[in-house]
């Protein structure tokens, strides 16, 4: 039986790790060829896609850099002739080393954080998504075959949390970028949707389950567990596939029941 993404080409930023990697593997299972775009080496993800009988290539990319995003989109077209799907999953939780909240709880408050931390998180999580989206959208418009763009936001687009202000603001921004682009790109048959995961077990959340923040996370998650990256990848598959042909501007929440409305 043909896969749900048979013959499609997907660019996945953040595809070397966590949610991006799980999405690359699931998309390959469903018949897509994949471009892994990440700061980190993506050779393991490329190998995982190839094991599934699909083609993959890695493009070293800093998504906060406009020229790098344009080069990423161009490399994808050069490698595969076109791009049908973008998953913008590259992101960071905070700038630099993990803040030592226990030693100085007030250091992570917005009133005390260095402006450089605020700027880096917004550069990667918000500007990086917008720059990736538009670089790929330009190629989709040129090709004239429509497309699907999926931005990874977070429950924190809607749920504020003390100490991660820049992250919350960046994800709220991703949600609005998604809605604006959904309107602007609808005439080109390009659907733009977002995913707002709850707490997912990836390298980004390593150590969360043993921390105070982790206890809070489980307290606001009725299912009382973290999700796994594959549970976000299945949402990304739905949004990329024809099953979601009338979805645009939506934010779907694989979050174990966290109240986000
Ligand atoms: P992850 O395993 O750390 O994967 C993120 C990947 O993005 C890493 O390979 C990371 O490289 C890369 N990256 C960081 N900055 C980049 C940049 N400027 N350009 C290109 N690549 C960059 O984390 P994840 O949990 O899968 O996160 C994926 C997305 O889901 C993120 O947008 C995150 O905010 C979002 N999300 C995660 C959760 C969760 O609980 N895990 C919940 C909601 C939303 P480095 O390791 O070198 O930084």
Image: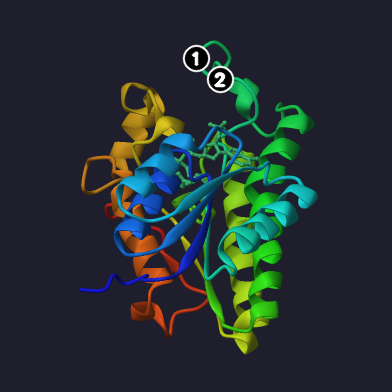
Q: Secondary structure at mark 2?
A: helix
The answer for how far apart the CA atoms under marks 2 and 1 are is 6 Å
Position of 155 compared to 93: left or right?
A: left
Residue 24 coordinates in the image, percent (x, y): 41, 52
Report whether residue 254 is seen: no
In contact (CB < 8 Å): disc 2 and disc 1: yes
Front in this rendered view, residue 218 or 145 = 145
Position of 70 compared to 44: left or right?
A: right
Q: Secondary structure at mark 1?
A: loop
**Badge 2: how crowded within 10 Å, few (<14), some, or many (20+)?**
few
Position of 57 compared to 24: left or right?
A: right
The structure residue drawn at horizontal position 78% and vertical position 32%, both measured from the top left corner, is 115
Front in this rendered view, residue 93 or 59 = 59
Q: Quadrant of the N terminus?
A: bottom left
- The verdict on label 2 being within 8 Å of ligand 1 is no
Report whether residue 260 is seen: yes
Which residue is labeled 2 in the image? 105
Q: Is residue 178 above or below residue 216?
A: below
Which residue is labeled 1 in the image? 102
Where on the picture, by quarter, is residue 59? top right
Where on the picture, by quarter, is residue 199? top left
Where on the picture, by quarter, is residue 196? bottom left
The structure residue drawn at horizontal position 31% and vertical position 27%, both measured from the top left corner, is 209
Front in this rendered view, residue 138 or 46 = 46
Q: Quadrant of the C terminus?
A: bottom left
Residue 65 coordinates in the image, percent (x, y): 76, 46
- The verdict on label 1 being within 8 Å of ligand 1 is no
The structure residue drawn at horizontal position 53% and vertical position 71%, both measured from the top left corner, is 84
Position of 256 compared to 128: left or right?
A: left
Residue 136 coordinates in the image, percent (x, y): 65, 65
């Amino acid at each position: 039986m043909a896969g749900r993404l048979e013959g499609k080409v997907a660019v996945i930023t953040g595809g070397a790790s966590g949610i991006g990697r799980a999405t690359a593997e699931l998309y390959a299972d469903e018949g897509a060829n994949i471009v892994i775009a990440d700061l980190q080496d993506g050779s393991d993800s490329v190998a995982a896609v190839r094991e599934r009988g699909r083609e993959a290539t890695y493009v070293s990319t800093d998504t906060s850099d406009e020229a790098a995003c344009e080069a990423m989109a161009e490399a994808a077209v050069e490698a595969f002739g076109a791009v049908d799907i973008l998953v913008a999953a590259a992101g960071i939780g905070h700038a630099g080393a993990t803040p030592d909240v226990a030693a100085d709880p007030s250091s992570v408050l917005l009133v005390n954080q260095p402006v450089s931390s605020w700027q880096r998180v917004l550069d990667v999580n918000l500007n990086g998504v917008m720059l990736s989206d538009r670089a790929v959208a330009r190629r989709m418009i040129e090709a004239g075959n429509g497309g699907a763009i999926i931005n990874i936001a977070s429950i924190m687009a809607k749920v504020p949390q003390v100490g991660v202000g820049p992250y919350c603001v960046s994800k709220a921004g991703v949600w609005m970028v998604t809605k604006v682009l959904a309107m602007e790109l609808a005439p080109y048959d390009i659907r733009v949707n977002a995913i707002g995961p709850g707490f997912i077990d990836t390298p980004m959340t390593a150590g969360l389950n043993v921390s105070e923040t982790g206890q809070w996370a489980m307290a606001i998650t009725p299912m009382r567990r973290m999700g796994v990256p594959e549970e976000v990848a299945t949402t990304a598959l739905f949004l990329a596939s024809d099953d979601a042909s009338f979805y645009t501007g939506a934010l779907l929440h694989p979050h174990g029941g966290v109240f986000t409305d």
